[in-house]
Image (cartoon, rainbow, N blue to C red):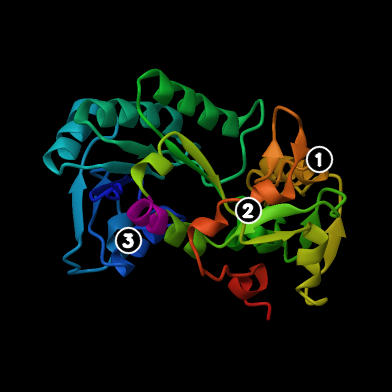
């Protein structure tokens, strides 16, 4: 007897980068989704008006009992988190996990949407959360998609400087996926795959595999390309974080196929779960950035 897919979905942290696109992806396939927003959130103004499949409620993310009551009232099967880890998201996500466990949520999708965690740093906190979720018996689905196509200008400080900075050798590939593809993929697999296929699983997807040098060539000389040891600090917020991410390319850490235990990159592993969205055509970096 086949398993029925999950039926009830909620999302917290529905911000502009990946949260709202995920909400829109659910609505595009006619699947109801509950948005749990902070009382002070203004992001909900970007959501569609008068869609019968969209419900928005407000809650204090630091109150497990408040969030749990909402989840229980709406009989939520799957809770998706897209909270940012830069502003207290680590602590908030632990609270959300407690709320989900208390409410009987069957699957928690944590705020990953990057590369496989290294041994230290911000992304390590995401791994620590997965360990915590397991310790309380809350199944998780972790989605690795590399860097969003849309963030390439940010990564290279092109946005601020008008120059494409490469703070690495530029010849090692990384994983890149369009935000719309990640959002659509999440909605698709959660509504079509049997629950047993998604419980305590890591999925790895890759829209395009490319080096920074290859991406810079897409601009066809329209912007200067600067090879450097580090991104400029003046006028470039979080330049050290961007430099560190770029330097990860040189050893394979920018790939979804990166194995932190063996410190090796497996190109086939990087896109092993693309097949769960059968027949889908993944957008290229050039298409998303309007370079074709």
The residue lying furthest to the front in this view is 1
Question: Residue 251 bears which disc, if any?
Answer: 1
Q: What residue is disc 3 on?
A: 26
Question: Residue 155: image x %, image y %?
Answer: 68, 53
Compare residues 32 and 192 and report the one nearer the observer.
192
Q: Label 2 crowding class (10 Å Cα cut-off): few <14, some 14-19, many 20+?
A: many
280 up-or-down from 261: above or below: below
Residue plotted at (66% across, 59% down): 152
SS at circle 1:
helix
SS at circle 2:
loop
Q: Is residue 207 left or right of residue 45?
A: right
Real-space Cα separation, disc 3 to disc 1, in angstroms:
36 Å
184 up-or-down from 81: above or below: below
Tell which tag, 2 or 3, sits nearer the viewer.
Answer: 2
Asked if the magenta segment contains residue 192, the reply would be: yes
Real-space Cα separation, disc 2 to disc 3, in angstroms:
23 Å
The magenta segment: 187-193
Q: Is residue 83 visible?
A: no
How many numbered discs sit on the rendered protein?
Answer: 3
Residue plotted at (30% across, 54% down): 42
Question: Residue 269: image x %, image y %?
Answer: 66, 46
Q: Is residue 93 left or right of residue 122?
A: left
202 up-or-down from 271: above or below: above
């Amino acid at each position: 007897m086949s398993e029925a897919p999950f039926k009830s979905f909620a999302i917290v942290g529905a911000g502009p980068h990946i949260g709202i696109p995920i909400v829109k992806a659910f609505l595009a396939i006619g699947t109801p989704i509950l948005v749990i927003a902070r009382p002070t959130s203004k992001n909900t103004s970007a959501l569609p008006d008068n869609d019968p499949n969209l419900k928005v409620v407000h809650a204090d993310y630091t109150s497990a009992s408040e969030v749990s009551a909402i989840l229980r009232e709406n009989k939520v099967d799957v809770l998706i988190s897209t909270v940012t880890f830069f502003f207290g998201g680590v602590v908030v996500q632990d609270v959300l996990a407690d709320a989900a466990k208390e409410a009987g949520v069957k699957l928690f999708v944590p705020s990953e949407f990057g590369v496989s965690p290294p041994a230290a740093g911000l992304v390590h906190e995401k791994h620590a959360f997965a360990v915590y979720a397991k310790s309380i018996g809350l199944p998780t689905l972790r989605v690795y998609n590399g860097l969003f196509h849309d963030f390439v200008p940010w990564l290279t400080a092109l946005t601020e400087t008008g120059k494409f900075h490469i703070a690495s050798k530029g010849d090692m590939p990384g994983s890149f996926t369009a935000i719309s593809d990640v959002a659509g993929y999440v909605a698709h697999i959660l509504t079509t795959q049997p629950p047993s296929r998604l419980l305590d699983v890591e999925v790895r997807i890759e829209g395009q595999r490319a080096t920074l040098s290859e991406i810079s060539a897409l601009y066809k000389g329209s912007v200067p390309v600067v090879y450097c040891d580090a991104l400029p600090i003046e006028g470039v917020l979080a330049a050290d974080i961007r430099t560190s991410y770029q330097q990860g390319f040189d050893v394979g850490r920018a790939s979804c196929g990166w194995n932190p235990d063996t410190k090796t990159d497996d190109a086939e592993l990087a896109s092993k779960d693309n097949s769960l969205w059968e027949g889908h055509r993944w957008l290229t970096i050039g298409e998303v950035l309007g370079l074709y």
